[in-house]
Image (cartoon, grey):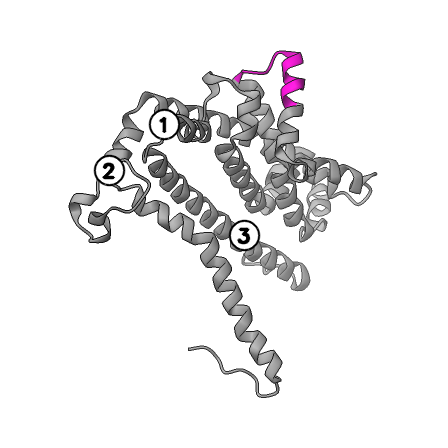
Amino acid sequence: MAAPLPPYLSATERVWYYAFRVICGLIFFFLVFPLVVVVPLSFNAVPFFTFTKEMLALDPAGYSLKWYEDFFTSLNWRGAVQNSIIIAFCATLLSTTLGTLAALGLSRPNMPAKTLLMSILISPMIVPLIISAAGMFFFYSRIGLQGTHLGVILAHAALGTPFVVITVTATLVGFDNSLIRAAASLGATPPTIFFKVIVPLILPGVISGALFAFITSFDEVVVVLFVGSFKQRTIPWQMFSGIREHISPTILAVATILTLVSVALLISVEMLRRRGERLRGITSYYTAVGKPDNI
């Protein structure tokens, strides 16, 4: 049961209290309702993007799993899934490595031109995607990477790196640099300090950034249309082609699966964020009061 409003609130504040929640509910409905509609339509027994009379009457004859069967048995969709997983995994690995190293460098207090470098690193998030795709197309065409898996991986890595930089930089805000000095005073080498001290504390931020980079690469369609070719056809490309050439509810089945995957990844990100907050809280507490001898 919701707590009663404080008695000192004015009539305007009380109205805004409820109006704000209504506005948030409407925004949530506007964002979620299209996703909710897609799920039942993916079980449609007929090749239409509308609710049939049988579906509205909850008749089992109006529902079918044949579009999911088509997704898992079609060679085109299987090839698209394979390309998406390979490209997204490689791009995530590359962007996570580069983004983590960049965030560690930018977190240094004596780093010159920090603001300028940060602006350059996050520019792929700001520049319109169609402009970035066109630039990548002309650049990769000159060096022979257009129409190759490596070209698409590098392009997606450039798009995913800003997410890693931002999440790791946010994690490093609460990092206690005295731990590095303490490890160095005990004779630890720089690689040991990095893997034994720094990485365990920033790991939630690194994994969160990697998940965002993976989602960005897995769901991206504009850049792969410019940089890739038919051999690099991914799931979003296959869906885009299906909408233009042959409309099939299989697209809705794929959209449902991608939605479930995205929800699972976002839940993982939230769990990692909470774990990171707990780790930072424990570290800050021990830094302030001292670590007990029995821990």
The foreground one among 268 and 47 is 47
Spot occupied by residue 167 in the image (x, y as percentages of width and height): 62, 45
Instruction: Please give the residue where the numbered disc 1 appears in the rendered image.
Output: 246
Q: CA distance from mark 3 to mark 2?
A: 43 Å
Looking at this view, name the residue that lies furthest to the bottom: 7
Callout 1: 10 Å neighbours few (<14), some, many (20+)? few
> Which of pointers 1 and 2 lies earlier in the amino acid sequence?
2
Q: Nearer the viewer, mark 3 or mark 2?
A: 2
* Secondary structure found at label 2: loop
Instruction: Please give the residue where the numbered disc 3 appears in the rendered image.
Output: 273
Does the image show residue 187? no
Does the image show residue 240? yes
> Which of pointers 1 and 3 lies earlier in the amino acid sequence?
1
The foreground one among 268 and 160 is 160
Q: Amino acid at mark 1?
A: His
Instruction: Please give the residue where the numbered disc 2 appears in the rendered image.
Output: 46
**Residue 257 picture quarter:** top left
Q: Which disc is residue 3 wearing? A: none
Q: Are marks 3 and 2 in contact (CB under 8 Å)?
A: no
* Secondary structure found at label 3: helix
Q: Residue at x 69, y 35 (%)?
A: 190
The magenta segment = 136-148
